[in-house]
Amino acid sequence: MKDDLHFLRLWDLYSPLLTATQREITDLYFNYDLSLGEIAEQKGVSRQSVSDCLNKCRKQLESYDEKLGFAKALDELSEEYSAYMTTVERFIESESGNFPALGRLKEKLDGVHEAFGAETVAVESGEIVGKVFR
């Protein structure tokens, strides 16, 4: 399961670099939850060839990530974003009584979160836990 989540993350980032057939097979397997047999039947190939394709795609996606490093860059960006948003949220919370315009700033920030697919969840410690891109 953990490997599948890692693979899906890499797939989201690098699937345009796969061939159309590879994209279709990996999409059917991971996003549509079809079995190897169901994919094989749909594509008119053997279960083994579907399995081989999935294994090859995993290796390719790992290789792309080693060379390009987008997953790590997104992780770092997400951590920075969460830290900044925690600071901003705390400031708005503490100063909103003194500066009513901060309420409008909060509304604007919420709009930015929605536009970029950021999911913002406050936890007990007051930290903002976010995911920059859905």
Image (cartoon, rainbow, N blue to C red):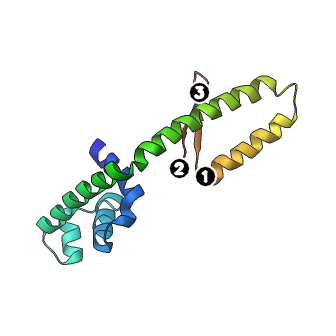
Q: Looking at numbered disc 3 in the image, what kind of residue is underneath it?
A: Glu
Q: Which of marks 1 and 2 is nearer the N terminus?
A: 1
Residue tagged 3:
127
Q: 17 above or below 79? A: below
Residue tagged 2:
133
Where in the figure is residue 85, as x and y percent of width and height?
A: 64, 34
Which label belongs to residue 116? Answer: 1
Q: Which residue is drawn at 82% across and 35% down?
A: 102
Report the front residue among 40 and 56.
Answer: 56
Q: Looking at numbered disc 2 in the image, what kind of residue is underneath it?
A: Phe
Q: Residue at x 32, y 70 (%)?
A: 24
Residue, far bottom = 44
Where in the figure is residue 93, as x and y percent of width and height?
A: 75, 26
Query: Badge 1 local density, few (<14 within 10 Å), some, or many (20+)?
Result: few
Q: Relative to 99, is 119 on the left or the right? A: left
Report the front residue among 16 and 94.
Answer: 16
Q: Which of marks 2 and 3 is nearer the N terminus?
A: 3
Q: Relative to 10, is 34 on the left or the right? A: left
